[in-house]
Image (tube, rainbow, N blue to C red):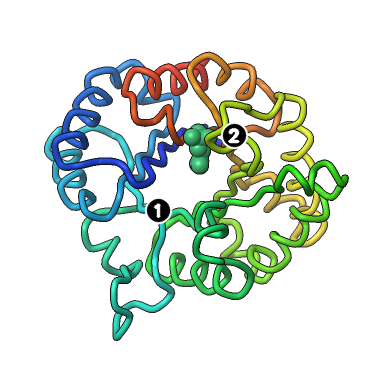
Amino acid sequence: MRRRLIAGNWKMNGTLDETRRLLEGLVAGLEPLVDRVDLLVLPPFTVLADASRFLRDSGASIHLGAQDLHFEAKGPFTGEISGAMLRDIGATHVLIGHSERRTWFAEKGELLEKKLRAALRAGLVPILCIGESLAERERGRTEDVLDEQLSETLLRLGPDEARKVVLAYEPVWAIGTGKHAAPAQAEEAHRHIRAKIAFAMGGEIAAEMKILYGGSVNGANASGLLARPGVDGALVGGASLSAEEFLKIARASAN
Ligand code: PGA
């Protein structure tokens, strides 16, 4: 049984004060949910250590992760943060290949494979984001794009590494646009991704792996998306900046 995971990608948002307030709101609403769903927050690097201390001191079972990492453990990489450094401050998860990093920082292919391996070496759970653009969907290329993005990253790992990865299907046209995928579209994409993994790595691994949906998930549309078979949770951007909204999504997934 794949346990549900609701992850909040805060992106480039969160001063120390805002972080503290948001986490307090989450901790206050958490109690009835703890046994049924895993919650994860992904704040920016600058507040991670503080968030980690706050979560540890409050005893809340909310996991902590980062939005990116460098592929080396340390060294002359000005401005970068490694998986070992993330582990050191208590992070357990890390996003890899988010579409905003693919778009703004040209991340793809071999680099993402290296980041995946680095996260696993550091003992972090990588959340690998994949998804098609609107133009690719309109040209009927959605499945090809997903196949390519899987082939150049996840499918280059060995089965024992791959099974530790969480996938996030995030159609680029749904991210930050308010236009989420229809539940049937999400289900179809998730089914395709799982079938591709099963073909490449075997049904057992495919059945074990969590696939989250991301793209304009909010408290109102979460239950429809999360009710679909194969949708194992959500990667939430904008709506994760409100404790109330994020908890609503978590509640929808616990039902
Ligand atoms: P959104 O972002 O929920 O604001 O669409 C999702 C994401 O980028 O992970």
Secondary element under disc 2, as helix, strand or loop, is loop
Q: Position of residue 154 (x, y in %)?
A: 64, 63
Asked if residue 5 can be seen in this view, the reply is no
Q: Residue at x 84, y 50 (%)?
A: 141
Q: Position of residue 203 (x, y in %)?
A: 76, 50
Residue 139, above or below 102: above
Q: Residue at x 15, y 47 (%)?
A: 50
User: Quick check: 60 left or right of 253?
Assistant: left
Q: Nearer the viewer, residue 233 or 131?
A: 131
Q: Quadrant of residue 55?
A: top left
- Residue position for label 1: 67
Please name the amino acid that badge 2 sits on.
Answer: Asp
User: Quick check: 199 left or right of 146?
Assistant: right
Secondary element under disc 1, as helix, strand or loop, is loop
Quadrant where the image shows the N terminus: top right
For residue 232, which numbered disc appears in the image?
A: 2
Asked if residue 92 can be seen in this view, the reply is yes
Q: Residue at x 30, y 85 (%)?
A: 76
Residue 255, above or below 201: above
Q: Residues within 10 Å of mark 2 (few under 14, many from 20)?
A: many
Residue 226, above or below 86: above
